[in-house]
Image: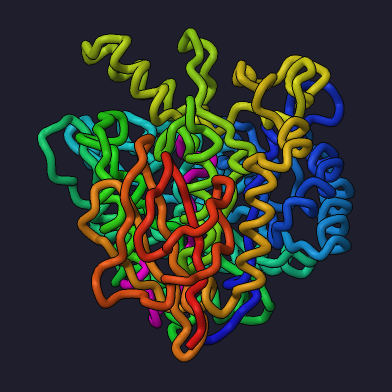
């Protein structure tokens, strides 16, 4: 397997609006991030992924970009951004930027020109169509509720927006659009950034006929016509050839709706597209009929999905490893126990992320065990997806409490409450009123408390990051082999280097003790193995072939060498 720095890195994701405010306006900003770089260095991460900081009207919190080469005034200046880049590089860390090029803001100059006239030279930068029988051009639904089309009275046509009505989709079939995007990417790379996270990058190619989606609703999900579309791979290979291959960088594509086989096309080292992708199969584990229909998840399904991706990309490409981000609920609330066993379960889930094959991504506050929030009123929520869903479901007759329960479980604002730095007013995030309310538990869960407590989740993350660097051959590059596949409470696997180190990882996913026993004929070398890391105080004399896992316990064992 080819070795690369981005395979051996740990990435920390920053959502700028909620990380650190420097000027008291309640909005996180770039100078605020700069003030916390020593914290990131102490944690031990290698790469920072910065969510969008470009000029934007903020309909979707910066994922609606109105100018790709300017910094949003709320976040600071280009000089601030350059100081951030220098501050990271001087500390041995790298910076990757969010690339949002499936769509722009409707306030981008391209779109403002596009909508002026059917004859505008920018008309074909976007996807415009006539209506059909007094309705939209097709029946596709937007990811943010309602139709994926918006009527524009100026020219009497509709434009496509897979997300908000203020996020018109670019027409990637137009070579001028692709040239504009590639030139912009090279501009940022020449400024010294170390790569891109590419927002919904597998949606850039649509089936040209834009046919109706199947389904019984007024609007239906048309993903089969725009996910992994007919030219998606052609365009990414062109992007790689024209831009990416000229720099020593990392790339990760957000790719909803991919299978391991499809992902392998995006990340194969021989095809020249991307380094890795974010897949969403695990993120749908608790979804029934759509995201907001929340169902209990089962560990056997969780393990099956994780193993499917570990083995499905083995030798074919590289995995990204994450359990939460700015679009997902907090991992300890979703997959652990954010009450009695918050610390133990947060550490257990972190052990999983940092001992699988792939590049781990830490979302801000995850290293503190930050939890989901339950605001008392819908009026405290800010996320456009959440608010649109609330109105649509309420109008459709769904009981309000059912809607709120879905938001408490899956709403994106769970991840967007401000970073909890200390127990002072507004959690040390701002001297003013935060743009979104703090999670009330910030007085108990915060970075100041965590850094003083040697047994904290924060210090456990530091140990995990060190462990990964000390055992690169086995943890980063070693073979993954699941054991006890049918067990309902334990997730266990080995990481193996042929003729070398062998590690055993055993994780209890529940709040009751459980007996762990290696299958006959497996892992004799662990009988006298060494405990490399665990989330409980070590117990003397444990036989690592058969022992009791305490509630949410995680252990990493190194087998005896031959």
> Which residue occupies the foreground of this view, 242 or 119?
242
Magenta stretch, main secondary structure class: loop
Q: How many labels sit on residues? A: 0
- Magenta stretch in the rendered image: 310-329
Q: Position of residue 174 (x, y in %)?
A: 46, 64
Q: Position of residue 99 (x, y in %)?
A: 59, 55
Q: Is residue 99 above or below residue 58?
A: below
> Which residue occupies 48% across, 37% down?
332
> Which residue occupies 49% across, 56% down?
555
> Which residue occupies 87% across, 46% down?
80
Quarter of the image where one finds residue 258: bottom left
* Residue 332 in view: yes
Q: Is residue 517 left or right of residue 387?
A: left
Q: Is residue 206 above or below residue 381?
A: below
Query: Which residue reaches farthest bottom?
Result: 499
Q: Is residue 335 left or right of residue 292?
A: right
Residue 333: in magenta span: no
* Residue 237 in view: no
> Which residue occupies the foreground of this view, 320 or 458?
458
Quarter of the image where one finds residue 431: top right
> Which residue occupies the foreground of this view, 382 or 479?
479
Q: Position of residue 496 (x, y in %)?
A: 44, 78
């Amino acid at each position: 397997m080819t070795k690369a720095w981005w395979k051996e890195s740990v990435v920390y994701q920053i959502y700028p609006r909620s990380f650190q405010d420097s000027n008291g306006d309640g909005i996180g900003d770039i100078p605020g991030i700069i003030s916390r770089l020593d914290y990131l260095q102490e944690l031990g991460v290698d790469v920072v992924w910065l969510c969008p900081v470009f000029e934007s009207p903020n309909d979707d919190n910066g994922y609606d970009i109105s100018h790709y080469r300017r910094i949003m005034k709320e976040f600071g200046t280009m000089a601030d951004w350059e100081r951030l880049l220098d501050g990271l590089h001087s500390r041995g860390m790298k910076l990757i930027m969010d690339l949002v090029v499936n769509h722009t803001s409707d306030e981008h100059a391209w779109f403002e020109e596009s909508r002026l006239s059917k004859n505008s030279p920018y008309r074909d930068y976007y996807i415009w169509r006539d209506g059909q029988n007094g309705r939209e051009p097709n029946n596709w639904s937007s990811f943010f509720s309602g139709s994926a089309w918006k009527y524009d009275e100026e020219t009497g046509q509709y434009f496509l927006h897979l997300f908000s009505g203020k996020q018109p989709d670019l027409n990637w079939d137009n070579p001028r659009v692709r040239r504009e995007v590639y030139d912009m990417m090279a501009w940022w790379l020449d400024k010294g950034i170390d790569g891109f996270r590419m927002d919904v990058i597998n949606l850039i190619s649509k089936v040209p006929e834009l046919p109706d989606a199947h389904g019984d609703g007024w609007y239906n999900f048309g993903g089969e016509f725009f996910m992994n579309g007919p030219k998606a791979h052609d365009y990414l290979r062109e992007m790689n050839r024209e831009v990416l291959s000229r720099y020593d960088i990392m790339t990760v594509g957000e790719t909803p709706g991919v299978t391991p086989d499809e992902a392998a096309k995006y990340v194969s080292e021989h095809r020249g597209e991307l380094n890795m992708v974010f897949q969403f199969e695990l993120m749908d584990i608790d979804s029934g009929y759509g995201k907001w229909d929340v169902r209990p998840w089962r560990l056997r399904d969780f393990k099956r999905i994780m193993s499917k991706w570990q083995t499905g990309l083995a030798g074919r490409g590289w995995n990204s490893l994450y359990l939460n981000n700015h679009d997902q609920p907090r991992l300890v609330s979703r997959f652990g126990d954010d009450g009695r066993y918050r610390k133990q379960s947060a550490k257990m889930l972190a052990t999983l992320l940092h001992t699988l094959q792939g590049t781990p991504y830490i979302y801000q506050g995850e290293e503190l065990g930050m939890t989901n929030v339950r605001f008392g009123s819908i009026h405290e929520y800010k996320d456009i997806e959440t608010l649109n869903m609330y109105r649509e479901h309420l109008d459709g007759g769904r009981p309000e409490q059912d809607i709120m329960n879905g938001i408490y479980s899956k709403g994106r604002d769970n991840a967007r409450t401000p970073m909890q730095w200390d127990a002072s007013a507004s959690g040390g995030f701002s001297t003013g009123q935060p743009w979104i309310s703090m999670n009330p538990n910030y007085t108990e869960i915060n970075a100041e408390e965590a850094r003083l407590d040697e047994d904290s989740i924060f210090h456990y993350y530091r140990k995990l990051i060190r462990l990964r660097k000390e055992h690169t051959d086995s943890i980063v590059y070693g073979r993954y082999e699941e054991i006890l596949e049918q067990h309902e409470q334990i997730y266990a696997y080995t990481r193996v280097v042929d003729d070398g180190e062998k590690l055993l990882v055993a994780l209890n996913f529940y709040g009751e003790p459980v007996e762990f026993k290696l299958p006959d004929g497996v892992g004799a070398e662990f009988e006298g193995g060494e405990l490399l890391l665990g989330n409980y105080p070590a117990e003397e004399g444990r036989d690592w072939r058969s022992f009791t896992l305490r509630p949410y316990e995680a252990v990493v064992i190194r087998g005896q060498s031959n």
